[in-house]
Structures are given as structure tokens and as C-alpha cells.
Image: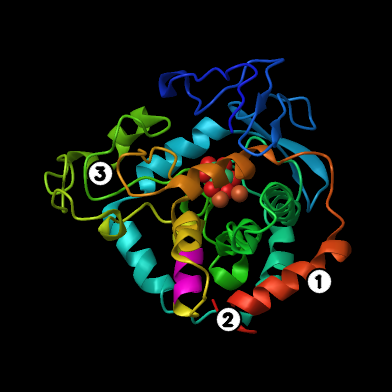
Amino acid sequence: MTILIKQPEFVGTEAGERKVYEEEKVLVLDAGLVVPHTTSFGQTFRLTFCLYNDFKTGIMMQKSVEIFYQINHIKQTYDFVQRMRNEYSKLNRVEMSIWECCELLNEVVDESDPDLDEPEIVHLLQTAEAIRKDYPNEDWLHLTGLIHDLGKVLLLPSFGELPQWAVVGDTFPVGCAFDQSNVHHKYFTENPDYYNPAYNTKYGVYSEGCGLENVMMSWGHDDHMYLVAMENKSTLPSAALFIIRYHSFYALNKEDVESPKWLHLFSKYDLYSKSKVRVDVEKVKPYYLSLIKKYFPLKLRW
Ligand SMILES: O[C@H]1[C@H](O)[C@@H](O)[C@H](O)[C@@H](O)[C@@H]1O
Ligand SMILES: [Fe+2]
Ligand SMILES: [Fe+2]
């Protein structure tokens, strides 16, 4: 059941933000996750600026999320995405377990995320544990929470040290006209595909009803982790793979695809489980190791 105590305020993309929540507003989600109005730094969720801790220097940094999206929208072209998919589907860079990858994420800072002031592994565990609390029987969804952002390893040297704009942020279809509902839509006018008649019509290189799975999304951590899970023959259900692949596609319309129900549910936990309450890693580790064993091989190719 969804109980709305007070509705969050949605501000249009023109204002330069995806979602801005008015102060003092609280939203109770389907199974009890309470959406707080501030992060641990007292910021409202999804503001224009991103405050993050540079782990290397220990200094708090402030970065404009809008500038991040400007670069992202200019550089993510159809051609670029194709090259990235070909390159990274080789999975010839690293061999490691899922848990080893979770630990690697501690080195990563996501500059597109204005809400995150904790290391990525904390975010993974907070997402997974929040879902586990509300949906104790859906073990596959707990594991999905844990692994959904593992593709951010693309930022690390052993994965080619891709720039932020090629790894994080919301995703969008390429090869057809950029939709107005994409965050910071105005910057697409600087993308070369915007002027290419092969790519700038409603359906572009696709045909009506071709199916979402045949549409190329901007390149980033979602698609990368999806490829890793598929190629390494994960036995996770298709709903889990769908979440991993599209969790950054916020402009996805409910009517566009069949049953994105789990995705919408998941997004709430991805966005709003961020808090100062740290999960005790050692305490929960055995549980997640058992799930990893159930759904993945011991070592994966990345
Ligand atoms: O800020 C980004 C967000 O825009 C993406 O949609 C999400 O998948 C990333 O993990 C997050 O950090
Ligand atoms: Fe993500
Ligand atoms: Fe996330």
C-alpha cells in the first residue's frame, strides 16, 4: 500500500533538476521505507550540486551536476555507444567474484549523484538491506540491490578509467530523437546526433514497436553490469536483469514496457535508502555471500 503523507514536489527538467523535494516533506513508500527530506549533509535530495568526499584527499568537494549532464549529453552519441558495447562485451579485463567487485567500488566516486556522501559499497548495502527489510522473501531483489551499481568499476584504471560522463548519470536511448523528458534536455542540441537525419527522427534507426531490448541506451554502468551478468550466466530472474539494465533510465514511461513494476519499486530504494545509518558489513556479509553463490559463478569475467 502506498501512503502519501505529503506529496513530493516535482520540478520540471527546465529548472535543471530531475526531482526536487520540498523541505519538511516526508513520503512513506509501498512497504514502509520512509523517504527523508534531507541527506546526512542536510541537503535536500537531488539538488543541482553534488557534495562528495574525495577519498584520496579527504576533502569535501562540490561539483555541478548540471555540468556533468552537459558533457554527458554532448558526448554520448550512437557511434560512441556502439564502440563501447563492442569493446566491453569482450569481458577480457578482470576476473573476480561479485564480492571482490563490491569491495573495489570503495575506490569510486560518482559525480552525478548529488545525494551520495558515502562510499559506493555503503550505498549498495543500504539499498539491499532496505529492500530486504520490506521484502524479506525476495532474495533475488536483495542481491539486485547489492550489485546494481557494480558497473561503476568502469571508472577504475583496470577497466580503462572511463570518464564520469561515460559511466554514471541517468541513461537515455540513442539512435533516435532525444526525448524532452530526459533530464537537462537542452544540452542535447550540442550532441552531433541531434543534427544527423539518421538519428534525429522519432524512431531513428529503430522501427515502431521494436522492443526496448533492441534500443541502444547511452553507455554506462547499467549496461556494463547487465552484460557481465548475462555473459557469466547468472541465474537471476529476468526482472533482476531488467532492473540492472534500466535502473538509470528515469525517463522510461510506465506504458512503454510490460511490467516495469519491480523497476519502479527498486528505484525508490536506490534513491532513498541513502542515510548516515551504516550497515555493519561483516554482519551482513555471510548472507550476501550465500546469495551470490546461489545466483552467480564463483569467478566472473569482467
Ligand atoms: O546519479 C546517478 C543517477 O543519475 C543514475 O541514474 C544512477 O544509476 C546512478 O547510480 C546515480 O548515482
Ligand atoms: Fe546506478
Ligand atoms: Fe544506486
Q: Amino acid at mark 2?
A: Leu
| Tag 2 residue | 300
Mark 1 vs 3, N-terminal side: 3
- The Cα atoms of the two marked residues, 1 and 3, are separated by 49 Å
Using the numbered discs, state the Cα–Cα distance from disc 3 to disc 2 in whole angstroms.
Answer: 36 Å
Question: Would residue 112 be seen by someone viewing this image from the given angle?
Answer: no
Residue 286's label in the rendered image is 1
- State which mark lies toward you, 2 or 1: 1
Please give left or right for residue 73 compared with residue 262 in the image.
Answer: left
Q: Is residue 99 above or below residue 138?
A: below
The magenta segment: 225-230
Image location (x, y in percent) of residue 20: 57, 22
- Residue at 71% x, 50% y: name it: 123
Instruction: Name the side, left or right, on which 66 lies relative to 137.
Output: left
Q: Is the residue at mark 1 in contact range of ligand 3, meaning its CB lies under 8 Å from it?
A: no
Quadrant of the drawing holding the N terminus:
top right
**Does residue 123 appear anywhere in the picture?**
yes
Q: Is residue 59 above or below residue 281?
A: above
Instruction: Say which of 213 and 220 sits in front.
Output: 213
Q: Position of residue 226 (x, y in %)?
A: 47, 65
Q: Residue 192 shows which numbered tag?
A: 3
Mark 3 or 2, which is nearer the eye?
2
Mark 1 crowd level (few <14, some 14–19, many ≥20, 10 Å Cα):
few
Secondary structure beneath dot 2 equals strand
| Whole-percent x, y for residue 301 in the image | 54, 81
Main SS of the magenta segment?
helix
Secondary structure beneath label 1: helix
